[in-house]
Every structure is written in structure tokens, then in C-alpha cells.
Image (tube, rainbow, N blue to C red):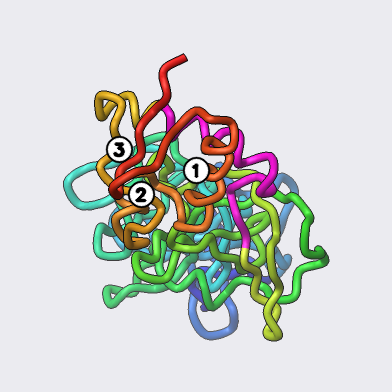
Amino acid sequence: MKLGELQKLKIQKRVDFGVYLSDGTDKVLLPKKQVPEDCKIGDELTVFVYKDSKDRMIATTNTPKLTLGQFGVLPVSQINKVGAFLDWGLEKELFLPFKEMTRKPSEGDEILVRVYIDKSERLCASMKGIYDLLSKKPPFAVGDEVEARIYEFGHDFGTFVAIEDKYSAMIPRHEDVSKYRIGDILMVRITGIKEDGKCDVTIRDKAYVQMEDDAVAILDLIDSYAGVLPFSEKASPEVIKRETGLSKAAFKRAIGRLYKERKITINDGKIRRVED
């Protein structure tokens, strides 16, 4: 009997509350409400085998959204003190333990997970290990704009996303993703495809488009500092990233534009806004 998989089993015995199915060695109950009409002893049924709320093996003719070893997107239906529960198309929801979360989701979020068997021989979900399951070498080219779902914030590496919930990609760590959550879908642009097929992507527009938005954001930041930014484009990348959310290159481009437009002055390591 294969836990967590679709399989063909034969009807061995009929009881008041359903039928027992067998693989020739073990048997499992298919509840009465799941039993197809006009079936008889010896008939073969395709069922999914999992465990009920009392940890008993049970069969269903319903097909879950994910089976053992698969990964995909499932909605979070509820969260309690032990973890989260996901809707995977069966009466008993799929349990996501806290220890298998890369970051705590919220009810209603749609997150990328995989199905595994825990130490108690129960089917559970995990947000971990998705990176190794994603496909490589996507059918896209540098410059293409595609949808990608955030599945893990990678800290020192960047933000891990799945293009079309299928292909491996990463947003570089210098790009500001602080306003996003696990499960969010973003429009990204492919900036590079490595030899192994993994993608680098950006949430920013092309430089000449993005520069306008960056320049406006910097002016707002200068205003928040009473018209004088206490650092310039010569500051360290870490300082610039922390204060503006921009990479040093993007910051310099935006500052250069504002300077040419005579909206700022740069003196003594400080950037001052020019009054209109």
C-alpha cells in the first residue's frame, strides 16, 4: 500500500460503511460515500491513500492537487499554534509544520510547497527544498518579462522565485523586496541565464525607465532629511542600500540625472535639494 500516491486497488470486501480495497497484501477502507455505484467485488479502482484524523490509512477516489514528492501552489486555509493547514482538495487538509516553513504565511496566502512523509508516517507539506525541485533552462530569453512567485527570502544570496511556479530564478540581494511576502507574484525581467539554466531576474524596469522613479524617490528621501541628504554617491554600497533600497549603481544613475536637471547640488559629501 503506497501512502500518498494514486494507485489501483481491487475491491476485496463490502461492509456497511464502505468497501475494503487490497493490493494483494494490505487492505484499506474506502468510505461508503466514496464508493462508485454498481461496483462489485474484484473490481479495480484508482484511489489515493492517505491518513485520516485518527492516523488510520484510508482511501479516496478524489484526486489531491499534489501527491507524494510533488510540489505546487496550495492556499493556506488556517493557521494555529502548531502550524498551518493547506487546501489540497481532500476533506482532511494538508498540515504544514512551523519547522517546515521558510517564513510564516497568512491565511489566504497561496504558497509553493512540496509533499513529504514525516517521522510519524504522515503526509505533510514543506516550504523547504523547493529550490532543488524547480526546472532549469526555461523557454525564455534575456529581456523577457514573466511572472514569478516568491518562495523563499535567501538573505545573503537574494530572493528565490519560481518563474511560472516551475523554473528556478533569483532576484539579487541588493534589490528591495521588503514590501513583499512569501507567495506574492511579481512581474520580473530576465537579466541573465546561467550555464546550468538558472535565471537571474530583476523587479526593476530597464535603467532608463527605472531611473525616473528612482529620482523621484530620492527627492522624497532628501525632503525627509530636511533638504540635505547626509551622504553622497561615494558612500558605501551598504549605506546606500540601507538608506535608499537601491544598489549603488542605480543610486548613482538617479543622482546623476537629478544633478543634470539642476534639482540637487553635491558638496562636502552631502546632497542638497535645490529649491524650485
Looking at the image, residue 135 sits to the left or right of residue 271; the answer is right
Please provide percent x and percent y for residue 225. Answer: 25, 29
For the residue labelled by badge 3, is the local secondary structure a helix, a strand or a loop?
A: strand
Please say whether residue 149 is one of the residues in the magenta stretch: no
Q: Amino acid at mark 3?
A: Leu
Q: Residue furthest top?
A: 276
Residue 229: numbered disc:
3
Q: Residue at x 59, y 79 (%)?
A: 23
In the rendered view, tell whether residue 264 sits above or below residue 36: above
The local crowd at label 1, few if under 14, some if 14 to 19, many if 20 or more residues have their Cα within 10 Å, is many
CB-based contact (under 8 Å), mark 3 and mark 2? yes
Looking at the image, residue 150 sits to the left or right of residue 154; the answer is right
The local crowd at label 2, few if under 14, some if 14 to 19, many if 20 or more residues have their Cα within 10 Å, is some
Tell me how far mark 3 sits from mark 1, CA to CA.
11 Å
Q: Residue at x 48, y 67 (%)?
A: 28
Q: Amino acid at mark 2?
A: Ser
CB-based contact (under 8 Å), mark 2 and mark 1? yes
> On the image, which quarter does residue 139 sit in?
bottom right
In the rendered view, tell whether residue 13 sits above or below residue 189: below
Residue 169 appears in the rendering:
yes
Q: Residue at x 53, y 60 (%)?
A: 171
The local crowd at label 3, few if under 14, some if 14 to 19, many if 20 or more residues have their Cα within 10 Å, is some
Q: Residue at x 58, y 40 (%)?
A: 257
Q: Which residue is mark 2?
A: 232
Q: In the depicted view, which residue is nearer to us: 40 or 216? A: 216
Q: In the depicted view, which residue is nearer to us: 237 or 275? A: 275
Q: Which residues are magenta?
A: 201-219
Q: In the depicted view, which residue is nearer to us: 213 or 129? A: 213
Q: Which residue is mark 1?
A: 255
Q: How many marks?
A: 3
